[in-house]
Amino acid sequence: MSTMQWQRFMGRIDAEKIAKLEGCELLKPAYGQRGFLTENDPLTAFPHDSRYAMLDEVGHDLPSLLYDKDFRIYVRELEIPRWQGPVTEENLPQLRLYYVRLSFLASAYVNQIGEEPVKILPYNIAVPLVRAAMLLDRLPILSYDGYALYNWKRFRKNQPIRLGNIDTLQNFVHLYDEHWFIVVHIEIEAIAADILAAIASIKRKLVESDDADLSPELWLIADAVQRQVEVIKRIPEHMDSSLYYKTFRPYIRFFESIAYEGVDLAPILFRGETGAQSSIMPTLVAFMKIPHQRSALTDHLADMRNYMPLRHRLLIKEVEAMPDIRSPEYKDPYNAILDAMAAFRRVHYGWAQEYINRWTDDPRGTGGTPYMQWLKQMLQETEAHRL
């Protein structure tokens, strides 16, 4: 059973929905407020009288429950409410939280540390998870959107989305290391709002004039990517490399030949949560027109888009359709963006070596890809594209 067949089964490839979205401009000023984060802060808990409120308690207890060797028995006995009705603008925050709680529970069940691997996700999780995934136009596994984009809150609502003012809603372990790993990504995503706003401004200028000066926006993009570099450098402040690999990384691992009980489809490999499912770098690559050589690695990368929210995937296509702005006229700011992107990839490569590669002989990351080789290729081809 192929990923494409799963997508068709779930209605993820909805021609009418995609045509409707492709007919409107997704790259717009609103992205300058939040980037790829949700338009409003995620819902932190269901209302007390909600039929889904029991999922908050399960989610809160999950890090403790995972210490119990009978955790899977406990899960199979849970009466998980199915999502009722269609998705609307009003209930979308609740559906996203429902997906976060369920997908964490599914990954915890499949990948419980210290227990034998399983090949079947039980009916009481599988069926409601697939239903939620259908409504969100996505595959039924915890991906970057559920692990990061929908999984945060601000302590002070009037303060920025920034380290020190953000925390997670759901975790696999009690260690703060996992909170830190996630919230670092959240600040990087928040900074990306400036990148998208600048790209949107450039698109408008290109439409309005043939000789518009794009330098101000290009310098803004370079500055934003460099700020992202400074954030990702902070990973070691609260994340121990030995703890990362042994304690919570296993829970975001891919699903390999897992059958969804009650869902009439064959087992399949679903890629696990990985930063490669973030839409930031693919958007920058599309904007900068960086020619990454076609290989098995870039095919893996292309498949990662299937785990992104539909609007994000279509926005990347919109940016890909923009004119190439690589020109001697913009040599300095253009190269500054590439240098910042290369710096980000270089730091990322270093952390992959420190936090993953030194602890294992398995060349596959949580997404199931040969990550070290892939990261090195992306870095080299980014550097080679300088003017």
Image: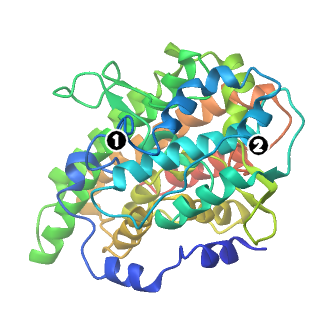
Q: Residue at x 37, y 39 (%)?
A: 49
| Residue 386 visible to the viewer | yes
Q: Residue at x 52, y 14 (%)?
A: 238
Look at the picture and state if 320 lies above or below 272: below
Side of 100 relative to 25 (left or right) = right
SS type, badge 1? loop
Q: Camera-side residue: 365 or 96?
A: 96
Q: Are the two marked residues, 2 and 1, in contact with CB atoms closer than 8 angstroms?
A: no
Amino acid found under the numbered disc labelled 1: Pro
- What x and y, as percent, mark residue 290? 47, 62
| Residue 387 visible to the viewer | no
Side of 286 relative to 161 (left or right) = right
SS type, badge 2? helix
Q: Camera-side residue: 166 or 280?
A: 166
Between marks 2 and 1, how big is the CA–CA gap?
26 Å
Q: Residue at x 38, y 64 (%)?
A: 87
Mark sitting earlier along the chain (2/1): 1
Residue at image mark 1? 42
- What x and y, as percent, mark residue 204? 15, 69
- What x and y, as percent, mark residue 226? 35, 36
Look at the picture and state if 304 lies above or below 212: above
How many neighbours does mark 1 have within 10 angstroms: few (below 14), some (14-19), or many (20 or more)? many
Residue at image mark 2? 110
Side of 44 relative to 330 (left or right) = right
- What x and y, as percent, mark residue 221? 27, 47
- Looking at the image, which residue sits at the far front? 49
